[in-house]
Amino acid sequence: MTTLSKELDPQGVGESAGDRHHRLRWVILGVLALAQLMVVLDATIVNIALPHAQASLGFDNADRQWIVTAYALAFGSLLLLGGRLSDIFGRRTTLMVGLVGFAVMSAVGGAAVNFEMLVFARAGQGVFGALLAPAALSLLTTTFTDPKERGKAFGIFGAIAGGGGAIGLLLGGMLTEWADWRWCLYVNLAIAAIALVGALLFIGSQKAAVRPRLDMPGVVTVSAALFSIVYGFSNAETNGWADWATITWLVAGAVLLATFVYLQSRTAHALLPLRIVLDRTRGGSYLVVFIAGIGMFGIFLFLTYYLQQNLGFSPISTGLAFLPMIGALVLTATMSTAVLLPRFGPRWLMTIGMLVAAGGMLYLTQLTETSTYAAHILPGLIIMGLGIGSSMAPAMQGAISGVSAEDAGVASATVNTMQQVGGSVGTALLSTIASSAVASYLTDHASQVASNPQYTGQLAAVHSYTTAFGWAAGIFAIGGLLAAALVRSGKLPATPEDAVVVHA
């Protein structure tokens, strides 16, 4: 469209759907960011409300984990299916179905009259979240084609993916203290409504020119594999690694995952074409997202315990305490993808970011029962935000770089799968390590337990947190080494054709 025609037609009447979609790309980013925020914060916002929900509905501590696990199981096991459905039925359609379904299930959960109804609603949120998350990321991929603009867009999106959990803690604390625990679920209706109106008004049809077939054997095996793995790690968190159910579920998950890989290598219409994950840059990016998911849960879970139980922070104060980390994360996520990634490529950004995050975790290992927020926690949070932001956003962009339009949905779903499974692994692994540290500390200080059990218990709890932070630091460091070893140097390819040139 010429300049004159634009002046005569300022509202864009008569422009093609593609031109309109491009013109509204930054508005579309806002819609997609809202959808992503709803999915990410829902993983933590309910955690703050759990004690109040437990008192209201009258379920015991043994059942409490299912409020979290039901969401994780459904979301983690169905993400790859959701990604492929967005490729088949269109990303806009899948996004809107996911938004409506997520809102309905949130309303059911907010109105829950018993434990079973709440668990059902949380599982339903996971199902529709598995449709929503990959559709949003793949829409971002197809909306922003200019490398510079794509970098800015992925910076914002990556910042939300990295900081959404902390935002969930803050929002959950505010709603629980000022309103009622049920509003931690009802708030999704407002978010989903805004995003749905935005999708209807601004996002055009996103159907692929060639509709891929649905690989049902692949769907069944990978969904069962991811369910088994997530459930196995969730069981390990409560019953330990030696429990027969933990071992059975994890072994079953590994066998099913190996079967899935074998099937994908043999079918012409693979659910997850192996070319997507076997590319060095994409494979390394997926691993970085996975490891970041493990480490981030170490921050949110144990630092929340420390702030509330040791420093006496309220739920709102706890959420506010994480804001500096979010600010640092947003800063480096947007800067790294918009400025540094086009110049230096993803390899060293991910490597340095992971190592900086490891340094932030190491800083937190020096916490004691008398530590203060300003001197002993705030610097570590800022360092963590700088590291996660500069690694997470480039990793998310690297994970979908050079994929064809028909594979964008499943490639995006794999990013979310790695983050979700990483979170489940991190919660179980670090919780088990922390529990072992408590038991070991109490055994080694048996005489102090007898004379002053309350104070010794406090010391044991702090020791468990710092032990978990130390392990998380090591995990982040491993992520940095893997990024340096696997990810290619140079710019990211935008298309499969570019990938052939870059990788030649």
Image: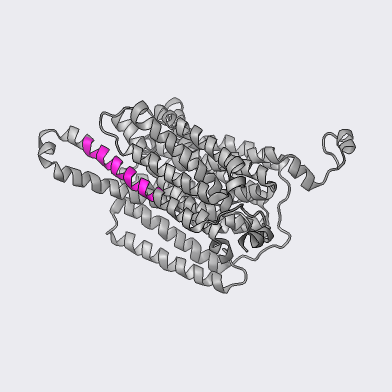
Q: Quadrant of residue 118?
A: top left
Q: Residue at x 44, y 40 (%)?
A: 44
Relative to the observer, which residue lies in front, 469 or 84? 469
**Residue 251 appears left or right of 338:** left
Query: Does the magenta portion include 348?
Result: no
Res. 103 visible in picture: no
Q: Which residues are magenta?
A: 459-476
At 27% from the left and 42% from the top, the residue drawn is: 464
In depth, the one of 452 and 94 nearer the eye is 452
Residue 191 percent coordinates (x, y): 58, 36
Which secondary structure is most common in the magenta stretch? helix
Q: Is residue 397 visible to us here?
A: yes
Residue 502: image location, x then y, percent: 63, 59
Name the quarter where the C terminus is drawn.
bottom right
Viewer-proximal residue among 60 and 232:
232
Position above or below: 384 against 479: above
- Residue 465 belongs to the span the image colors magenta: yes
- Pick the quarter of the image with the N terminus: top right
Lateral position of residue 370 relative to residue 15, left or right: left
Q: Residue at x 39, y 32 (%)?
A: 379
- Across and down, in percent, residue 286 comes to 51, 55
